[in-house]
Image (cartoon, rainbow, N blue to C red):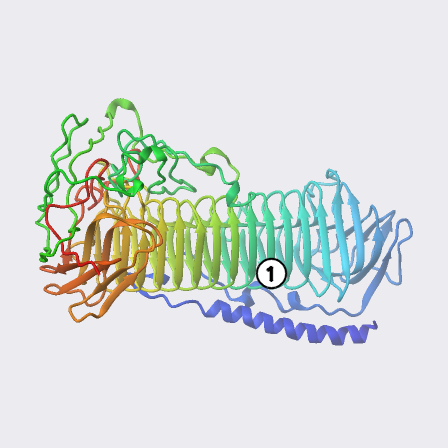
Amino acid sequence: MNTRLKALLAGVSAAALVLGCTACQSAASSGGSAGTAGTLQASTLSSVSVAAESDMFTDRDYEVGYSDYVTINLADGATSSDGGGFSITGDVITIAQEGTYLLTGTLTNGQIVVAAADNAKVQLVLDNASITCQGGAAIYVKTADKVFITLAEDSVNTLASAGSFVQTDDNNVDGAIFSKSDLTLNGSGTLNITCEEGHGVVSKDDLRVTSGTYSITAAKQGLSGKDSVRIAGGAFTITSGKDGIHSENNDDTAKGFVYICGGTFTIDAQQDGISASNTLTVLDGTFDITTGGGSANAPAKTNTDSFGGMGGGQMGGRGSWPGSTDSSSSDSTSSGSSSSDSASSSASDTAANPLASGTVPDATSSATTNGNMPTPPSGGSGTMPTPPGQSSGSGTDSSTNSGSGTAPAMPDGGTMPSMPDSSSGTSSGDTSTDADSTSSTSMKGLKSDAGTVISGGTFTIDAADDAVHTNGDLTIEGGTFTLATGDDGMHADGALTIEGGSITITASYEGIEGAQIVISGGESAVTSSDDGLNANGSGTSSSDGMAADDTATILISGGTLTVSAGGDGLDSNGTLTVTGGTVYVEGPTDSGNGALDYGSSASISGGTVVAVGSVGMDVNFGSDSTQGSILYDLDSVQAAGTAVTLTDSTGTVLASYTPQKQFQSVVVSAPGITAGGTYTLTVGTASYTVEMTALIYGEGNEMGGGMGGGQMGGGGQMGGKGGFGRPDSSSTDSASSSSTNG
């Protein structure tokens, strides 16, 4: 094809790329609305500012045309050319002048070296070129201002580094393409890259890719840019022994970032899929990422907690009931944050956790309703803590029909666990282990050190470690996520904000974890073996080691959230606030956790919440709520698929949900629940009448749900409401509830 025709076609291609560029700009400027949850605005929580696409790429980065070029015909021992600007020594071609060079042909053991002036811009056009270098880089950029590698239209090109690298100068060359200067890859052809002992593509400056099709197989990283990796488009298939895409700069805190506004990515990495030592920004793209062999290959978790069942803070949460032998779960402690609770129940827990067996023993004593602690059982080990002052429960059940189920009360029976010996030397901090604590290998899907913003794209991630992880703040403005992970679905050491998008976490240890969690939009569905949502705050305790961490917050103001958790459904070491949105929670089937769990307070002023789970640690929203909420304990375990519906006195449905797990405790809050109203809770074929003498009906079991987190439990420091679980007692109260079998 002649030069003029190529230039014409290149102009058309460039115009198409500019349209793609515009799409990137639109994605950058159309983030989801911030919304307000509680007193915090979602958009103010993120520490990451999203740069415009025009700041990331130049016009020439998109330019795939070429003219006035020099053709170099590659051949073993017989390379030839029709121009100058370069020299040939054996099968090493050294380009010394600025310009455009078209490479075609084959070198079975050769190299292209760029050694031009520091202000020179060099374009290498690969037009069915194949270059293999034994012990070195197929293309080695030593000096230049910027180098462009353009893939000619319809061309198929191969660059390979074979064997161990042999260093020939002061540079530590370790990639099939290795550049000391800015490097841009573009074009409409295909490039196959292999590196037996190093990286696929390395730039010690900025690495940009705007178009092209790439297949990269590397023993180490696939794409690596020290100052940054910036991708506007292209199709990538990367198989790597370390990270798929990596940027790291320990010398300049403003660099080491990854910015992606388009492209299609299939990454199979033994370590992280995409990793940045600074920020990670994704505006658009399609991502299919597998790390560490996938979630099925995640290390098994172990739990060293010795005291559980008191929820949310320093003294509760997880672990095993006395007499239980469960040690099958553990907390996750990745990247400086503490996870709250662990929750899985072994067969040996059946006797200790009545709900796990699907049956509940008969009641042996009447329930308390004034918030006092239950009398310790005879022969119990340890001393019962002094109960906090509580007001009498609000709301009574007025029905007289036969049936069962009441506002929950304190259990009888069981043995209180012994308090730890302060002289034992056991730390009150989280002693659980996970992959990061036992190995330096990180196997996360998307990872950043400083913060991550994702405003669009489609993500399918199967990760042995966290699917999406940052040591800073994480903001999800949009995108579609399908995540399976051996640890957290989404994790932020700082604030984790969800403003939009569709998130489906099909498998995780903890679903969504952050110091603060703010949800103002989007659709999220979380499945976890431990906590569904876990807000762990600063991860530090107060001087007395027993206070809730009020820096931990879960704030929900919009969107739709569905949680199926083996541990606590929504767990905040500090506060839980709901002002809007729709929330469905299916909590644990053991009595050591609750559908809701919080360290200091929980309030609701809007939105709809239906939370079901076991009875041992169930809690309701608190008295500072401005919307009514009902907590109701049923007298027996309900099977999965049993519908829950709340109607008002006119028969209007206020809330309805059909859990896919068994349950015995129900929390319902929805607009229309007011003090003085009468409501009907229908569970399966049974109906229960609830008269709201106050705004909150049923406080829950007073001493749990807020004492987890550390050596003796889950979540944070001491915390608010919850309850001692019911290892040996019935869930029925002395007060009767109405039941209309229909």
**Nearer to us in this view, 507 or 121:** 507
SS at badge 1: strand
- In the image, is residue 555 above or below residue 195? below
- Quadrant of residue 478 in the image? bottom left
Q: Is residue 2 left or right of residue 207?
A: right
| Label 1 CA crowd tier, 10 Å (few <14, some 14–19, many 20+) | some
**Nearer to us in this view, 266 or 148:** 266
User: Residue sitting at 68 percent across and 60 percent down?
Assistant: 213
Residue 84, image x, y percentages: 85, 60
Q: Is residue 562 left or right of residue 478?
A: left
Quarter in which the C terminus is drawn: bottom left
- In the image, is residue 297 above or below residue 419? below
- In the image, is residue 226 above or below residue 20? above
Report the amino acid beneath label 1.
Answer: Thr
Residue 469, image x, y percentages: 46, 49
The residue that mark 1 highlights is: 264
- Quadrant of residue 35 in the image? bottom left
**Nearer to us in this view, 213 or 322:** 322
Q: Is residue 281 left or right of residue 700?
A: right
Quarter in which the N terminus is drawn: bottom right
Q: Is residue 146 visible?
A: no
Residue 250, image x, y percentages: 53, 45
Residue 346, image x, y percentages: 36, 35
Q: Is residue 710 visible?
A: yes
